[in-house]
Image (spheres, rainbow, N blue to C red):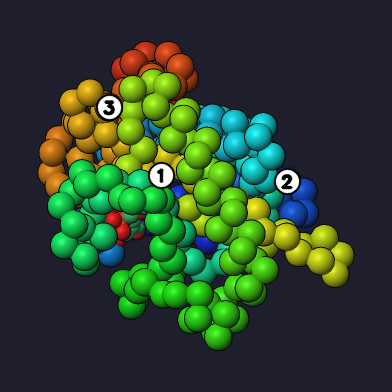
């Protein structure tokens, strides 16, 4: 295999130069971190599952007109994506109180919110991704007012679609985090969905038992992390071959 140029390495993914200008290859690692990477583990097979789940979700979202960076999956761990200029915001959408909103506002976990709430966090590890408002975002030029409006509208569409998609397979979408990027076309740019959508970036609870099927299993040491991610994939009707893949050794995947 020829050596490819690494463009960026994050905690859970690596971006390599793509085959054509304007494209990148997004590689999903098994590395798992929480609490600003103070807690770390390698969960064998996680990257393979998240690659597939993100492919599935991004493809469905494109189908309802939510433009995103996904082009096609290349192999077990890699997907071809459009290169965008990442907007340095984590956009969190919540339907039910959990995690940081529960702590911050004293709302018991599991309390349905009066309506879906969108929050912005500034992507800056050194500062522990602080929550920011539209005032900060526009004042510091992280995004323009029109871009924020587009982000809010797209995030609500993503939320509506994902809520229905998961609910159909017995999963409650508690909250999720997404990221956006700018795609340049001549003098213009538009905001499209980027990054990933997977159990690493969503809270997903079994609708009947409220059992957690997401990264909180890792954050809170609940065990069975991979089993839960696999269950999400299974319910969505993807990765039927997963058990064989695991037994066959996921590390041996080649492009
Ligand atoms: P929070 O309750 O910790 O603010 O998390 C809200 C949602 O965002 C939850 O689904 C987990 C996800 N998330 C990430 O994807 N990355 C992060 O770094 C954090 C803090 C949360
Ligand atoms: N991924 C983040 C980190 O490593 C936090 C999280 O998802 O909880 O710090």
Residue drawn at point x = 65 percent, y = 53 percent: 192
Of the numbered discs 2 and 1, the one sitting upstream in the chain is 2
Mark 1 → mark 3, Cα distance in angstroms = 29 Å
Q: Secondary structure at mark 3?
A: loop
Q: Position of residue 165 (x, y in %)?
A: 47, 28
Judging depth in this view, the residue of 110 and 143 nearest the camera is 110
**Residue highlighted by disc 1:** 29
Residue 21 position (above or below residue 160): below
Q: Looking at the picture, how far across and down is residue 153, in whole percent?
A: 59, 54
Mark 2: few/some/many CA within 10 Å (<14, 14-19, 20+): few
Whichever of labels 3 and 2 marks the residue nearer the N terminus, that label is 2
Q: Please name which of the two marks, 1 or 3, marks the residue nearer to the observer.
A: 3
The x and y percentages for residue 34 are 26, 56
Left or right: 113 in relation to 28: left
**Of tags 3 and 2, which is closer to the observer?**
3
Q: For this view, does 180 lie left or right of residue 44? A: right
Circles 3 and 2, Cβ within 8 Å, touching? The answer is no
| Marked residue nearer the N-terminal end (1 or 3) | 1
Which residue corresponds to the image point at 28% horizontal and 64% vertical from the top-left?
36
What residue sits right under mark 2 in the picture?
A: 19
């Amino acid at each position: 295999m020829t050596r490819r140029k690494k463009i960026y390495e994050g905690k859970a993914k690596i971006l390599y130069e793509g085959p054509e200008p304007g494209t990148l290859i997004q590689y999903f690692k098994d590395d798992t971190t929480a609490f600003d990477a103070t807690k770390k583990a390698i969960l064998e097979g996680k990257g393979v599952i998240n690659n597939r789940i993100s492919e599935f979700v991004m493809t469905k979202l494109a189908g309802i007109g939510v433009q995103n960076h996904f082009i096609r999956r290349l192999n077990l761990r890699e997907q071809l994506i459009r290169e965008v200029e990442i907007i340095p915001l984590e956009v969190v959408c919540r339907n039910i109180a959990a995690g940081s909103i529960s702590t911050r506002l004293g709302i018991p976990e599991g309390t349905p919110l009066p309506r879906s709430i969108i929050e912005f966090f500034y992507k800056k590890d050194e500062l522990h991704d602080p929550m920011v408002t539209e005032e900060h975002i526009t004042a510091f030029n992280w995004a323009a007012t029109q871009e924020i409006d587009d982000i809010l509208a797209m995030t609500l569409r993503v939320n509506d679609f994902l809520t229905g998609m998961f609910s159909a397979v017995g999963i409650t979408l508690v909250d999720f985090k997404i990221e956006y990027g700018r795609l340049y076309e001549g003098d213009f740019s538009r905001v499209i969905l980027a990054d990933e959508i997977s159990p690493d970036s969503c809270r997903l609870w079994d609708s009947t038992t409220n059992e957690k099927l997401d990264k909180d299993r890792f954050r809170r040491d609940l065990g069975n992390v991979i089993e839960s991610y696999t269950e999400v994939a299974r319910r969505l009707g993807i990765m039927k071959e997963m058990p064989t893949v695991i037994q066959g050794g996921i590390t041996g995947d080649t492009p």
